Image (tube, rainbow, N blue to C red):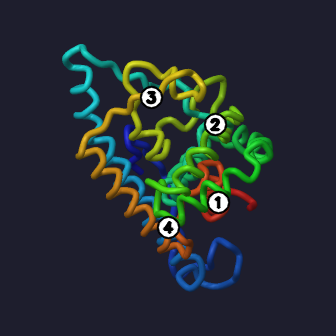
Amino acid sequence: MTIPGRTVTRVEIKPDRKAPCPCGSGRRYKSCCYARHRALENARGVARAGLGAIDEVLRVFLPLIESRGEHKIACHEGCNACCANFVRCSLPEALVVAEWLAEPEHAAVRSRFEAALPGWRAAAGADAAVIEDLLARHGGTPTEGPEWEDYSRIGLDYTRKRNLCPFNRDGRCEIYEVRPTICRAVHVVETEAYCTPDRGGVPKVASHPRLVEAVQQATAAFAHGARSLGTDGRERALPEAVATALALSGYSPG
C-alpha cells in the first residue's frame, strides 16, 4: 500500500470469494464480508489520495515560504504545541491509521494508544462530543455568530486541559507519517509559542489558495467515503475516530 510520505510493501493473502468467510459465519466470503471489506479498502483509498494531494501542494508551498529567508516554518516533526488541541479526523483517514497500527511492527504503538485511550476520554469529558456536534451541524468549523463563539470558547477550554493526544509519546507523535489532514496541512510560521493558549499572542498560519482547495476537496471526499460505509460522514476526535476504525476493520474487539 502507499501512504503519503512512505511506501510500505505488505504481503496479504485475500480470501477466495467462493471460500468460507474468514469471520466464521459459515457463509461464502462473497455473500458475507466481501462487500464490507471492499468498502473499507475504497475508503482507505480515498483517504490516501486526499492526503497525497495535500502533501503534493505542501511539497512546493512550504519551501517557497522560507525561500527568501523572511519566514520560517515553526511546525515540524517532534513539535507537540498543538497536541492538546481538539484534533479532528474523518473515518477514511482513521482507517488508514488503523491499518498502519495493525502492522506487526507498530504493535507497541497500538498497545500504548489503547492503554492511554480511557484516560484521554475521561479528561476530554463532554467537550469533545459538543465540538463534534458543532462541526457536524456546520459541515466544518462555524464561521460566525453564537456557534462560532461557542466553538472558540469550548475549543480553548479543551486545549487548556492539556489532555495530550494518546498518540503523543514523550512529546513526539507516534503516527506522524499517517497523521490526519488537520495535523498535516496547518503550518504556523515564526514561532509555535502562541499555539498554546494564554501566551499573549495568536499563531500566524501560512496558507495558499491551492492548499485551501486541496484541503476542501479532500475533506469532501472523506465525508463521502465515510457515508459510503453507512455513517453520517462527520469528523470526530482523532482518538475516537481511530478506535472506531480499528473496530470496523476487525483489528480491535470493539
Q: Earlier in the sequence, mark 3 or mark 2?
A: 2
Q: N-terminal of the two: label 3 or label 1?
A: 3
Measured as percent of width and height from the top left, residue 219 is found at 40, 57
Q: Which circle's residue, 1 or 2, is located before the other in the chain? A: 2
For mark 4, does the 10 Å Cα neighbourhood hold few (<14), some (14 to 19), or many (20 or more) residues? many
- Secondary structure found at label 4: helix
Q: Which mark is residue 226?
A: 4
Name which of mark 3 and mark 4 comes first in the sequence. Answer: 3
49 or 123: which is nearer to us? 123
State the residue position of label 1. 244
* Residue at image mark 3: 203
Q: Which residue matches tag 2?
A: 159
Could you say where residue 78 lies in the image, as x and y percent from the top left? 52, 23
Disc 4 residue type?
Ala
Q: Amino acid at mark 2?
A: Thr
Tell me where residue 154 appears, x and y as whole percent.
64, 46
- In this rendering, the answer to whether 126 lies above or below 228 is above
Q: CA distance from mark 4 to mark 1?
A: 12 Å
